Amino acid sequence: MDLKRSRGGRGRRPFLAFAAAALVLVTAPSALSDSGLAPRGGRTDCISTPDEYRAAWLARKVRCVSPSLFGTTHARGSTSLYPSGFWYAWAGSNTNLERYLELRRDYGDIPSKVGIGVLSYVGYPGLDTWSTPTDLAVYTVPPGVRAQVPSFETWFRLLDEEFGNTGAYPLASQTRLVHTYSRLGPHQDVVHAFQDVTGCRRDALLEGEDPSAAIGCNRSFLDALTAAGPSPYTTGESKSCFDNFNTRYTGPRNASALRGVLFQCQDVGFLNTGTGLGYNTYADPFVCKPAAEQSVLQKYTGREFIVPNSELDELPSHVDLPLDLGEPGRRDFLYGGYC
């Protein structure tokens, strides 16, 4: 998930922060879950309701979690998964929810490691100073709604389904974008890929700088942001944002422009992998090494999906779990490691 611009992903403003026809079915894994728990096939003791998840969270117990449950972080007091202007919300998988229970078990006596660990695992950047009160919503989706893997190909298919094949997203540019993200060197990560596509300097993004020409962002990327108009994190709305890009953008519709419109309209931030896996440059909470000693591969986190954005009270069931974030500026574990 990427709350992304101030999150990253899983890379935006203060939120983390997926139905249409022919949606992708989310199936339960047939082998061990990512957390190493026992296989789910035929099991009846996995957590299957938000209330059961809250009980395990409060008891600091680790249990397997049904694939029917999802988790999304949101600003405390919000009435929807994502701000109301968003078309889709980012959702963590059941494997992520299992990992959060492990964090709660292992670091329940140091609550900031739990709360910030969840946000890091989700894909928030800027966590050194993050101070927005944040909750974790655990929920089920309405019947007929299927979560989708947020690959670049999924986004462009959804746009074609919503707006028709307008020519706004040329296949050659989609290919270039996917190719860049799929050809990372052994020591490169997705923020390097974002820099390669957009020109925005990796170091400046990770220091919290907004995209601008001053940090190297290229003209196509910046013009795409301008043409798309306000982000749904402010006064914008995803569908009108995409439509604005379709009709107002006059520059080359290259990979940089395509990356820009996804960034602006749907919180596909600079930490986003484009593959459905989370990523963050901070120390992974489950790897007992400082961030500088962890490999790029070790900093990939769990599986993420997108679901149609919904009001919380319109979901079949949900619970909100408040995250204790501790004090900004006192989170050395983001770099020194959690263990």
Image (spheres, rainbow, N blue to C red):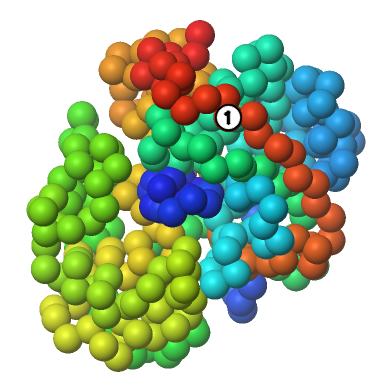
Nearest the camera: 322 or 69? 322
Q: Is residue 324 left or right of residue 85?
A: right
* Residue at position x 32%, y 50% in the image: 270
> Residue 182, image x and y in percent?
27, 48
Quadrant hosting residue 261 = bottom left
Q: Say above or below: 186 vs 242.
A: above
Q: Say above or below: 248 vs 66.
A: below
Quadrant hosting residue 207 = top left
Question: Do we see residue 39 in this rendering?
Answer: yes
Question: Do we see residue 173 in this rendering?
Answer: no
Quadrant hosting residue 62 = top right
* Residue at position x 70%, y 47% in the image: 137
How many numbered dots are placed on residues in this image? 1
> Residue 8, image x and y in percent?
39, 46
* Residue at position x 19%, y 37% in the image: 203
Q: Which residue is mark 1?
A: 325
> Residue 241, image x and y in percent?
40, 78
Nearest the camera: 192 or 46? 192
* Residue at position x 23%, y 84% in the image: 249
Q: Is residue 42 left or right of residue 17?
A: right
> Residue 318, image x and y in percent?
80, 51
Nearest the camera: 314 or 62? 314
Residue at disc 1, secondary structure: loop
Mark 1: amino acid:
Leu
Tell me if mark 1 has few (under 14), some (14-19) or many (20+) residues whose alpha carbon lies within 10 angstroms of its own: many
